[in-house]
Amino acid sequence: MLSERMNEALNYQANRELYSSYLYLSMSYYFESIGFRGFASWMRVQAGEELVHTMKLLDYVAASGEKAKMLAVEAPQHSWESPQQAFAHVWEHERAVTRMIHDLVAVAESESDAMTRKFLQWYVDEQVEEEESSDGVLKRVQAAGSDPKALRAADEELGKRGFKFPRGFQMFPL
Ligand code: OFO
């Protein structure tokens, strides 16, 4: 059983994860429209991961016997000035999500909700990886600058990213 405050905070975070998925999907189509299929593919994998982050939170709410609520998701930005600007946006976004996860942990602690606190550790660890990976990718794209050959090489490299479900997560069937 979750407190009302905890339940709302978890549902809200699920909504923010879904927004992240929507934002990265938007970036994926932006990259496809300017001919960077590798960057587009990297963003699509990222969007898929965010959808998993969304469902993992909602699954936890539902398994706690509470209502998993779908809140409205706002439209994300549709275009960026350059690949560098889009990847800088990813990095800033992930830093903001880390702050949200830390706020969520603070709610679990103030509600003395040890189970939710334990559950949220996965997100705390995941954000360390998310920040590291978005920082690495941003630096890689910044290093390519506006040199078309170097950008093509970065595009090809990032396009190799694969998708992995987190251990224990089952997408189908429930
Ligand atoms: Fe859900 O990790 Fe990115 O936002």
Image: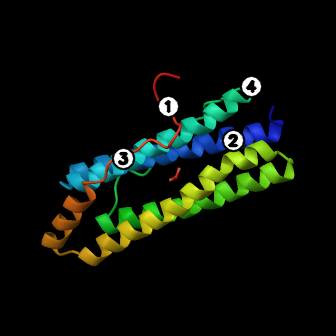
**As shown in the figure, which amino acid type bears the numbered disc 3?**
Val
Left or right: residue 85 versus residue 113 is left
The nearer-to-camera label among 4 and 2 is 4
Q: Position of residue 56 (x, y in %)?
A: 58, 38
Sequence-wise first label, 3 or 4: 3
Q: Which residue does the numbered mark 2 point to in the structure image? A: 10
Q: Residue at x 30, y 70 (%)?
A: 141
Q: Which residue does the numbered mark 1 point to in the structure image? A: 170
**Mark 1: C-beta under 8 Å from nearest atom of ligand 1:** no
The nearer-to-camera label among 1 and 3 is 1
Measure the C-alpha gap from mark 3 to mark 4. Answer: 31 Å
**As shown in the figure, which amino acid type bears the numbered disc 2?**
Leu
Q: Position of residue 173 (x, y in %)?
A: 48, 22
Q: How would you rate the neighbour count of disc 2 (Cα within 10 Å): few for under 14, some for 14-19, many for 20 or more? A: many
Does 174 appear above or below 59? above
Q: Residue at x 25, y 54 (%)?
A: 160
Q: Which residue does the numbered mark 3 point to in the structure image? A: 45
Front residue (pair 151, 167): 167
Q: Are marks 3 and 4 in contact (CB under 8 Å)?
A: no
Does 95 appear above or below 40? below
Sequence-wise first label, 4 or 1: 4
Q: How many marks?
A: 4
